[in-house]
Amino acid sequence: MRDAPVLVTGGAGYIGTHVVLALTEADWPVVVLDDLSTGNRDALPANVPLIEGDIGDRRLLDDVLARFGCRAVLHFAGSIRVPESIARPLAYYRNNTVNSHTLIEACVAHGIDAFVFSSTAAVYGTPAANPVAEDAPLRPINPYGRSKLMVEEMLGDAADAYGLRHVALRYFNVAGADAQGRSGPARPSATHLLKVACEAALGRRSEVPLFGEDYPTADGTCVRDFVHVSDLAAAHLAALEHLLAGGQSRAFNCGYGRGYSVREVLDAVARISGQALPIRPAGRRPGDAAEVVACAERIRAELGWRPRHDDLEQIVRDALALEHRLRDVP
């Protein structure tokens, strides 16, 4: 039913813009709601309506959902920094959990029954074993993970009570950028490991902090499953198609099933850029698990997700290419 638009909250952000691009390329009509606190208006296609505002504003939600006749919602709006969530937990519970409650309530009121939620591998906390599957215990170790898990639980209850079918996509470490240079983590304040490393390689940062070298991993640094943002965008389209075809509510991991250490990623950036990185050893950050790697069998089997960018070197090359373009913009 592509005559009715999809509402994308936080659609001007890093992941949101990639999903909007993928939706428009697949001929989906799209409406974006974003407060632009971290979003980039210029990364959106010119023909996509952008409503500037907060998802915690119920009157605005009612107006947008009714005016555009939205068929489904893809929800990205929220706060994502683990250390910040520890320092400002109540802000995270408001922005991620309370505001999501307002959005879910509005969706129920407007009869929407297809909802794709931007969740996180942080709901697993420190897994007892890796790769971690969707049925593993959910024991987040920071307010960020807890705030996202609460939304998953609200969605489960809303599905039981009101028929709001949903997919929760649990992201592992999102990285890279659109191969055509249309979008990526553009803000100077971004804290993604790969962006920080690429900026340092191009002389735009004075140092790359290395948070912890004494974890129980092969080289002492954290191990993560890095997934290309364009593959993640494809997963959202597959989740949307699943729901609109009558599929049931489900949680899916979004990762490749293979981990790389922080040092391996930094070494790859140095090798591909040809520049030594100014690495500064730093202590562990609170709230960081030693290793988190996805078991991604469910999403491949049930949604038919087939990653096209499962290669660390390609992820790094795309990220570096974006930083080169950003550097050259006046």
Image (cartoon, rainbow, N blue to C red):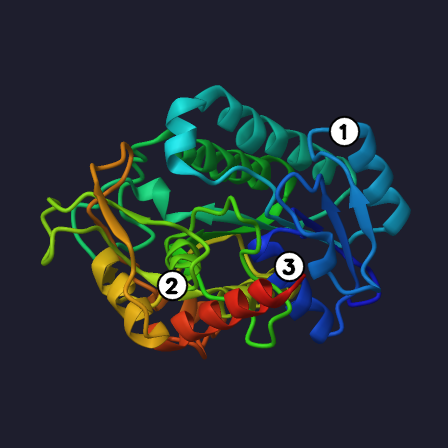
Amino acid tagged 2: Ala
Q: For numbered disc 2, what is the local secondary structure?
A: helix
Mark closer to the chain start, 1 or 2: 1
Q: Are marks 1 and 3 in contact (CB under 8 Å)?
A: no
Residue on which the image places disc 3: 17
Mark closer to the chain start, 1 or 3: 3
Residue on which the image places disc 1: 58
Where the N terminus falls, by quadrant?
bottom right
Residue on which the image places disc 2: 201
Please give left or right for residue 13 compared with residue 35 in the image: left
Q: CA distance from mark 3 to mark 2?
A: 25 Å
Q: Residue at x 49, y 47 (%)?
A: 190
From the top left corner, tell me how far across and down residue 218 is, in percent: 9, 58
127 or 83: which is nearer to us?
83
How packed is label 3: few (under 14 Cα within 10 Å), some, or many (20 or more)? many
Q: Are marks 3 and 2 in contact (CB under 8 Å)?
A: no
Q: Extreme right residue here?
A: 67
Indicate whether 291 appears above or below 270: above
Q: Residue at x 45, y 23 (%)?
A: 88
Say if residue 131 shows up in the picture: no
From the top left corner, tell me how far across and down residue 174 is, in percent: 43, 58
Mark in the foreground, 1 or 3: 3
Please give left or right for residue 294 compared with residue 314 in the image: left
Say if residue 15 shows up in the picture: yes
Residue 268 placement: quadrant: bottom left
Q: Residue at x 20, y 37 (%)?
A: 283
